[in-house]
Amino acid sequence: MTGTAQEATKEFWHIYGLPVLTIPTNRPCIRKVLSDSYFPDEESKWNAIVEEIVRFNQTGRPAGGNPERQASERLAERLSEKACSLIS
């Protein structure tokens, strides 16, 4: 059982001969699909990520993280800088 098999229905059937059945959720989905964001450079992208995490944090929502170690370290460094600037 998985929550992501629906997107790979054709592959499951083609490779494994397995059908994928969708079981509806017991509650309506509240997820909002947002449009893609494009940035002119990497600096702008990281600034937008940090601002979004700060905004989430102010509402008590957890946010952040990246599966790549270097990107996670870069994000942690930028968030630390942001935290220091907010305190000052």
Image: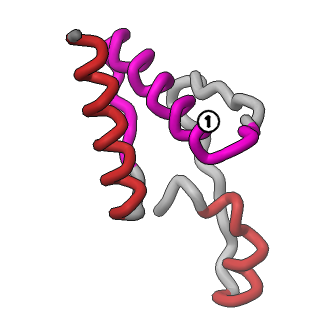
Spot occupied by residue 36 in the image (x, y as percentages of width and height): 75, 37
Where 87 falls versus 79 (above or below)? Answer: above
Q: Residue type at mark 1?
A: Ser
Residue 1 horizontal side relative to residue 9, left or right: left
Q: Quadrant of residue 77?
A: top left
What colour scheme was applied to this rendering of the protein? secondary structure
Disc 1 secondary structure class: helix
x, y (%) of residue 66? 41, 53
Which residue is identified by label 1? 44
The correct choice, above or below, for 46 with respect to 29 in the image is: below
Please count the marks in the image.
1
Q: Which residues are magenta?
A: 38-65
30 displayed left or right of 7: left
- In depth, the one of 1 and 45 nearer the eye is 45
Compared with 68, 27 (above or below) is above
Q: Residue at x 64, y 88 (%)?
A: 16
In-image side of 19 versus 83 (left or right)? right
Image quadrant containing the C terminus: top left
Q: Between residues 70 and 31, which one lies in front from this camera angle?
A: 70
